[in-house]
Amino acid sequence: MAEQITRAYPQAVIYSKNKIEGVEKITSIQAFLEAHFTQTDTLIFIGAMGICVRSIAPFVGHKYHDPAVIAIDSTGKNVISVMSGHVGGANALTKDLALLLSAHPVITTQSDNTDLWALDILGQQFGWATESNCINFNEPLTLFVNGKPTALLLECRDKGTAYLEQSLPPHVEVFYHVEDIDFQKFELLISVSPYLREAIEKPHIHFIPKMLHMGVGCRRMCNKEGIAHYIEQQLKANGLSPKALADIATITLKKDEPLVADLQASFGDLPVQIYTSKDLQKIEVPNPSQKVKSVTQSVSVSEASAINAAQGGKLLLKKQKGSWCRSKASTSYKCPI
């Protein structure tokens, strides 16, 4: 069975206490786990599940850091997802291995067995950042899988929100405007939105899609110190999450400015979109500047770049200029409702 698995997964390595040709020999399971538990993505035990559980018990930490653990009985009849079913991917791999071995997949996660959303990996699935106002993320997860009344707030649209709309569980009611929600009727809020919702008192899971596009213009070799912090504060002051930034956009003339590289690094290695003056001349902006035009041949860099990156989206944050720095930034929204 182990060899069959390695043929399907060439990156897998077989370990055994027995001396077998082509197999890595270990002195004991305990010693092996001490050396490898936190350095591996997945552990597959072939043998009794009791041995598996007793062996990993001293090393188990947190589901966001532990490897996926799977147990396969020695006859190959059952493939059992033991730990890190969602975040670690054990459930998905259990299903794949069961198909490979013609075995029965054993998955005990409630959301999988009741066809509910796997909220702990939903953000990862659709490229959303995930936040919660609960210290223990298991609190809102438990409310959801136990069928407590849940409000779903969708303030944007993408393939993820389409999936949620099409697979709505019976205990979830969807809303498109926060003011329409009567929070007295619900025990949990799930939102998909680039907007900050920090005043929510109910247990809240907030998914943040990357759909804000930041346009940047600046004086040549301007002082970049503090600008990233200023932009972050301006976003928050206007109710927008910095985690919703999808990219940075600017004109060709500014592509090598230290400020652009600094902002890229400060906001999580965002991609940078570069546009020519001709590209930006086509964009209508609320704050054109003849001074900017004299330098770039376009009446705008920051606002025009943001709108262009958002494919003509709504300008949520007009051109901002710090009083201590000759740099400007705007934010546009690609997918408004």
Image (cartoon, rainbow, N blue to C red):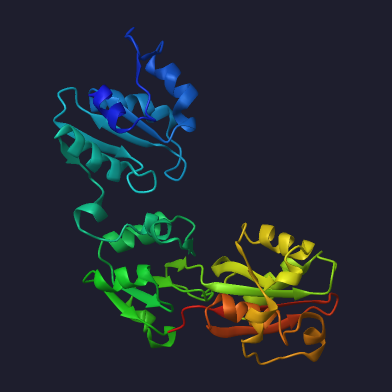
Residue 307, image x, y percentages:
59, 81
Residue 157, image x, y percentages:
40, 76
- For residue 172, side relative to residue 235 (left or right): left
Number of dots carrying numbers = 0
Rendered position, 67 above or below 286: above
Pick the residue in front: 233 or 212. 212
Image point (46%, 63%), residue name: 128
- For residue 148, side relative to residue 180 (left or right): left
Judged from this view, the residue extending furthest toward the top is 19
Image point (25%, 72%), residue name: 166
Residue 36, image x, y percentages:
46, 26
- For residue 59, side relative to residue 299 (left or right): left
What is the quadrant of the N terminus in the image?
A: top left
Rendered position, 227 above or below 115: below
Is residue 103 visible to us here?
Answer: yes
Pick the residue in front: 72 or 6. 6
Image point (32%, 57%), residue name: 118
Query: Residue 99, located in which quarter of the rendered image?
Result: top left
Residue 4, image x, y percentages:
24, 26
- For residue 92, side relative to residue 246 (left or right): left
Is residue 239 visible to us here?
Answer: no
What is the quadrant of the C terminus in the image?
A: bottom left
Query: Residue 239, located in which quarter of the rendered image?
Result: bottom right
Judged from this view, the residue extending furthest toward the front is 278
